Image (tube, helix red, strand yellow):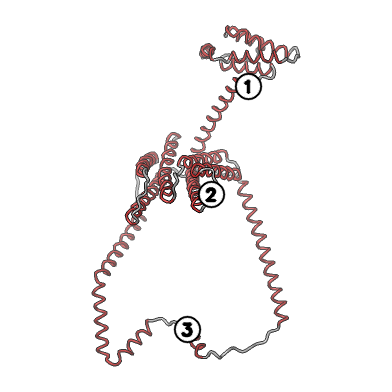
């Protein structure tokens, strides 16, 4: 699977999961509370969990950092969602605590689904299974709303469930399309599934036939039983009460065991009184109790130590890199490198424009960086004066500024003089003038000549 296909598939799966999650979260908030569920914060929690999982899986940090990252991120998103849902107030009533618990539970569900998506197999069968699962959740939501409206007469003012269902089908079909197997092998059904299908069909047919026969023949069976009971009373005559008693004795369970009946008939009978040796019993019981508590304490200590060792080993371990995660990890590493590159570029540009100049050496370093970005790279065998002369020939309007910077560098480096604040301010002013947008066309022209 190519990188572009994997990116599209992950995006479609995100849309699938968010559609049914948002539908259920909004339904729970509207139907049981009077607040509007913060769907924006919940979706942000979903994407943050996905990003953190990809990041730690790509970097292969120890599990303790993985756990801490998820705990801190989840706590931050729960706080943001609760603040957006009910405000930054301390809940006092039971209803307010329920609102907080509902928002926290739904944010945890969003976070969990985002974490699971990062390790999901993007195969055709897996995508189809999750597609069916989401459809089941959405149709269950519709059935619950219909039952509440029909049986309870309550109409829930919840507007965009149908739109989320349409979005779910849209993203689901896209995910199924991108997850199709591209091999040329002929797809064959397993024989075992045919056997299971036949057995399930036969069982369903027998159940329906049995239920139909019971409903059809139940009146006839009732009439036959009544007729048989009348015939039995007429045929037996004076023996009918005894026959009925025998049948009841056979088919009716006894309420009390025999020993209870005997004890009720003879309440005065008691067991023999056997004297016990009190001294022997006391020290023996104390010894057995002490031994039992000692063994139990040792078992608890061993189990606690073993659990602590396993927990420490788990937190200090690194996540294994599965073969199916290589494509996702390579994509994430490429994205991470690009983000770091752009951040460094913005950071360098910001420091070039607004950074403080403390000495002439930093000013000369910024001059070299400015020249490199303008298409004039300093050569290895080139002195600072020669490089400044070449820059002055290329950028004639900035000749005085370049001369100011190189003279300050010579005074500080070769003359071993410490520059005062006036010279430093002149140096900073010269660098600021060189970075002015007025000279950008000249720099672009010089950079273009390099090619």
Comes first in the chain, label 2 or label 1: 2
Residue on which disc 2 sits: 91
2 and 1 marks in contact (CB < 8 Å): no
Secondary structure under the numbered disc 3 in the rendered image: loop
Residue occupying image coordinates x 75% and y 12%: 415
> Which residue ends up furthest to the bottom in the rendered image?
238
Residue on which disc 3 sits: 257
Secondary structure under the numbered disc 1 in the rendered image: loop
Task: Please provide percent x and percent y for residue 148.
Answer: 35, 54
340 left or right, relative to 233: right
Task: Please provide percent x and percent y for residue 265.
Answer: 50, 90
User: Counting other residues with Cα less than 10 Å from the Cα at mark 2, is it few (<14), some (14-19), or many (20 or more)?
Assistant: some
- Total labels: the figure holds 3
42 left or right, relative to 186: right
Task: Please provide percent x and percent y for residue 385.
Answer: 66, 10
Note whether 27 is above or below 10 in the view shown: below
Note whether 287 is above or below 417 in the view shown: below
> Which residue ends up furthest to the front in the rendered image?
92
């Amino acid at each position: 699977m190519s990188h572009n296909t994997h990116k599209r598939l992950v995006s479609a799966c995100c849309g699938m999961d968010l559609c049914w999650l948002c539908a259920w979260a909004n339904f729970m908030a509207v139907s049981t509370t009077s607040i509007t569920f913060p769907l924006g914060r919940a979706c942000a929690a979903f994407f943050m969990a996905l990003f953190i999982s990809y990041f730690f899986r790509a970097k292969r940090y120890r599990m303790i950092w993985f756990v801490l990252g998820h705990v801190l991120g989840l706590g931050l998103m729960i706080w943001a969602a609760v603040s957006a849902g009910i405000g930054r107030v301390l809940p006092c009533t039971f209803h307010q605590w329920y609102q907080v618990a509902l928002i926290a539970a739904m944010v945890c569900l969003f976070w969990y689904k985002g974490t699971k998506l990062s390790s999901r197999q993007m195969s055709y069968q897996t995508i189809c299974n999750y597609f069916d699962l989401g459809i089941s959740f959405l149709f269950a939501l519709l059935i619950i709303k219909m039952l509440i409206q029909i049986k309870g007469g309550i109409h829930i003012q919840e507007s965009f469930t149908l739109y989320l269902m349409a979005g779910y089908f849209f993203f689901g079909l896209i995910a199924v399309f991108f997850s199709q197997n591209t091999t040329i092998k002929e797809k064959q059904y397993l024989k075992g599934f045919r056997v299971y299908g036949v057995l399930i069909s036969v069982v369903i047919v027998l159940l329906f036939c049995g239920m139909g026969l019971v409903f059809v023949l139940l009146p006839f069976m009732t009439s036959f039983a009544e007729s048989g009971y009348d015939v039995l009373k007429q045929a037996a005559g004076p023996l009918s009460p005894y026959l009925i008693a025998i049948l009841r004795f056979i088919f009716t369970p006894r309420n009390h065991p025999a020993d209870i009946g005997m004890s009720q008939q003879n309440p005065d009978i008691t067991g023999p009184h056997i004297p016990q040796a009190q001294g022997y019993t006391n020290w023996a019981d104390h010894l057995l109790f002490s031994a039992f508590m000692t063994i139990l304490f040792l078992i608890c200590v061993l189990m606690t130590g073993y659990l602590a060792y396993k927990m420490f080993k788990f937190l200090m371990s690194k996540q294994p890199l599965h073969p199916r995660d290589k494509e996702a990890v390579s994509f994430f590493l490429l994205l991470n490198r690009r983000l770091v590159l752009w951040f460094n570029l913005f950071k360098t540009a910001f420091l070039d424009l607004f950074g403080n100049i403390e000495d002439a050496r930093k000013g000369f370093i910024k001059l070299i960086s400015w020249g490199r970005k303008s298409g004039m790279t300093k050569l290895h065998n080139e002195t600072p004066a020669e490089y400044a002369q070449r820059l002055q020939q290329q950028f004639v309007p900035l000749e005085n500024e370049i001369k100011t910077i190189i003279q300050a560098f010579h005074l500080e480096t070769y003359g071993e003089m410490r520059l005062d604040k006036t010279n430093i301010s002149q140096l900073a002013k010269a660098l600021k003038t060189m970075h002015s947008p007025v000279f950008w066309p000249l720099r672009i022209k010089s950079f273009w000549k390099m090619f």
